[in-house]
Amino acid sequence: MGNNLKKRDNVQDSDNQADLGSSSQATPISATIPSDDGHATDDGPSTDNVVPQITDTAPKRVHDFGDLVRAGSYLLAFVLVVLVSLYLKGLTAGVESDVHTTAGHALEWLVDFPTSLLQQFVTTVIVIWVLVQLLINREWQQAITSTLALFSGYTVMRLLSMLIIHIGNQTLIEALSSSALLTGIGFLPDIYAGLGAFLTAAGPRCMRNSLVWGWNLLLGVGIVSVALSSNSLSGSLVSITVGCMLGMLIRFASGTQNKGAWGNEIVQSVRTIGISTAVLERLSEDDSHAMHSGDPQDERQQAQVRDAQSGSSLLDDNTSQSRIYRLVDTQGRSYVVSVLDNQTHTAGYLLQVWRWIKFSGIAMRRDRSAYDTTEHHLSMLLGLRNLGLTAAHPYAMSAVGESSVLVFDTDVRLEKLDLDGIDDDDARQMMHYLETAHRHGYTHRHISASNLSRDEHGNVVIAGWQNGDYASSSPNMSIDRVQLLVLLCCTIGRERTLNIACAVWGKDAVIQLAPFMQKVAIPASTCALPTWGKNTIRDLRDDVRKLSDEEAVESLETVNLSRFSFRSFAALVLLIVAVVVIITQLNLQQVIDAVTHANPWMAGLCFLFGVMAWLGGAISLGTFVDRDKRNYLGLFLTQVASSFTAVSMPSGVGPAFVNLQYLRKSGYKNSIATAIMSAVVAVQFATTFLLLVFIGIFTGRSSFSGMIPTNTLVVVIGVLAIIIALAIAITPVRQYAMKRLLPIVSTYTRQLLDVLTQPKELIISSLGSWLQSFGLGFGYWAALMAFGYHTNIMETTFIYLLANTIGSAVPTPGGLGAVEAALTFGFSSLGVPTALSLSATVLFRVATYWIRIPLGALAAKWLERHSLL
């Protein structure tokens, strides 16, 4: 019997046959071998001298997202160089002087040599050397894009020089120019931008020796040019950073040759884990080659190679960005080979980093290389199987070059689960599966429709554990459960899902998930399902809250999962506003003059009266707080912290905001906390009004009656009345108000009345509010006394309260500008010299506003550390 061996052409580009090893001539595994007596026999395949039959696609160019990251880093370097050149001239001048001193002596023989000729010579050598090597290796596209990058570098640097000259900033021009060339369109050296872009676009430095020596020559020329003052250090660094940034962007746009393992390299790699390859066949979504092994299960493998929606396959447990191969060894045993390349893994790593940045308080993996990802994936699957859970069966892993290889046994065959066919038993199996994993610390981190599957026995299996982790915390487990609940709600409905969840996980465990039910925790693929709606999360959370009594639900505060929530954004905005206000509104020279000319003892007394106002605010709030929840130091520090919020919020809003947050953290429900905070505001308003009337009657002060904005108040009330009437006239708005707003308002009003009908607490709160008002009024009296002006303390308090109330009505942060103007004008119109009134006002605002800002920030930090804010 002769050996008529068929030859099979590979599906690959002829330019890449060297990458695939012996794949162009393949021998099938059914070769006959001679027996010991010299006769032919068909007892089995030969394990020796069998040429592997390799069918692989040609390596494709890939868009490495790492190039984008590196381009961003070069952009930051460019900005840093410009800033250092502008604002740290001494540093750049010193470094450049050191280069002239140390390198100048060694390069004295080059002083008379034209540096432009040297640059042209080096440019010619580098360009020719790199292009010849690219063309010899038949990398036509790389040669074209590198040449285009060269031209782009020259062009962009010339345009940048023109732009800087057009702007006309002489300081910037001098910082980037050399002493030999201070002006002109080409004052920035373009050689570094052109060659930097050219070498970067040609590929990573380690790929070929021409790139290594090209970079060395370019950096050498740069040092020589700076040492001989042909180019400035700053200008050279700007040029090379711009060039590298352009090169990275062009390299990402055009793509780079995949440097991973292909064809014969994969065969050599799996040989290190004891597999002798007979057949290696690449599987793809549009694979046109039938897997004619005679095994119907292999046909099922090919039918579910790739899931069109997720771009991942259950064959390798949904490994992202992997290449999948079918491998048959010389013994006829079948495997699935998953190959993950570092270049394609970069996108996955950046996604992990983004999730790590986006999520707050939730642990996220960050696997920097394909090897790390594969190693972790292997340990996850082995751990799950050790728990008795069905999962993809990893055989072993290996690594070669820029690729990591994970080999799977084919005894576990998973098929994608049809979402339309999910029943209650399937949902129950999913929850049991996840519960078993959680009991041993395993979490999935990304449960979506593409991860739901069935094994050959019809049991439901959760696949896709590549981004999962072990030794997980309870928040990660809660996120897993929420993702599964939302996915099931989109398939079988909320009621059925919650009934099953309560039966499997327990009612209390389901209620504890309410704080984690946020859209940020749900995978994008789940949000893309047709049954997903904008109210899915809210409706599910409302149904979960109905499972428990109101008291228990209110105690569950929403967990801040995202760093980019509205709360963090608002905090950042408030901080920016505070900084802007301090920089733009604080007249430092005026403050210095007022403080230095003031009596220090009276200035200190002014501050102490301000502390008395803090104490009064704490009493006013604390009297409505239950004794078991009353933290005296915390109550006082909330008033101190409100001084920090005053710099970024209108007057009165900051203290109310801090008080409300403190009450919530103290264990009060939202409605009760709002009622207490409103009661405090109402008491403060009433006591201030009564104080003004009382002092005004006994002092006879009525000169400010014309300053009360009666007409403005009437206009505002009228406009609000019109808006409310129009809103009620519109049927949808009226129905919404009746169904949604009216119950909330009625509940709030009832609780507010309950708070205000407590005589003892009301009296104590009023005394605290009076203490607060008198403290600030006495503080202004002390400010006037600090400059030797004696006034009646009660009259001063009356005028201060009236002027401060008018100024605070202006919605600027802390009443800035308006309060100062009202106080200065009010007291000067009563006979206080204008200059003295202005100085007293500045001193008073320093003691009761500006100096409180850092103290308030420290108090807020303390409250936050002790979970009181």
Image (spheres, rainbow, N blue to C red):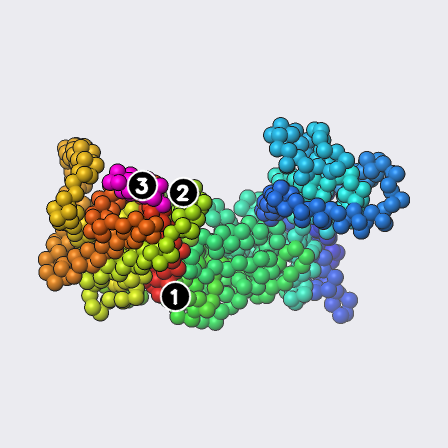
Q: Main secondary structure of the magenta part?
A: helix
Residue drawn at point x = 51 percent, y = 54 percent: 353
Residue 460 drawn in magenta: no
Res. 474 mark: 1
First in sequence, mark 2 or 3: give its number: 2
Q: Earlier in the sequence, mark 1 or mark 2?
A: 1
What span is colored magenta in the figure? 820-839
Q: Is residue 83 visible?
A: yes
14 and 257: which is toward the camera: 257
The spot of residue 801 in percent (x, y) is 23, 47
**Residue located at (73% from left, 64% from top):** 48
> What crowding class fits label 2: few (fewer than 14 Cα within 10 Å), some (14-19), or many (20 or more)?
few
Residue on which disc 2 sits: 585
- Image location (x, y in percent) of residue 101: 80, 49
Instruction: Please tell me how crowded label 1 is: few (under 14), some (14-19), or many (20+) other residues with Cα within 10 Å.
Output: few
Check residue 833 in the rendering and tell me which mark sits there, or answer none. Answer: 3
Relative to residue 359, is residue 426 drawn left or right? left
Q: Nearer the viewer, mark 1 or mark 2?
A: 2
Q: Amino acid at mark 3?
A: Pro
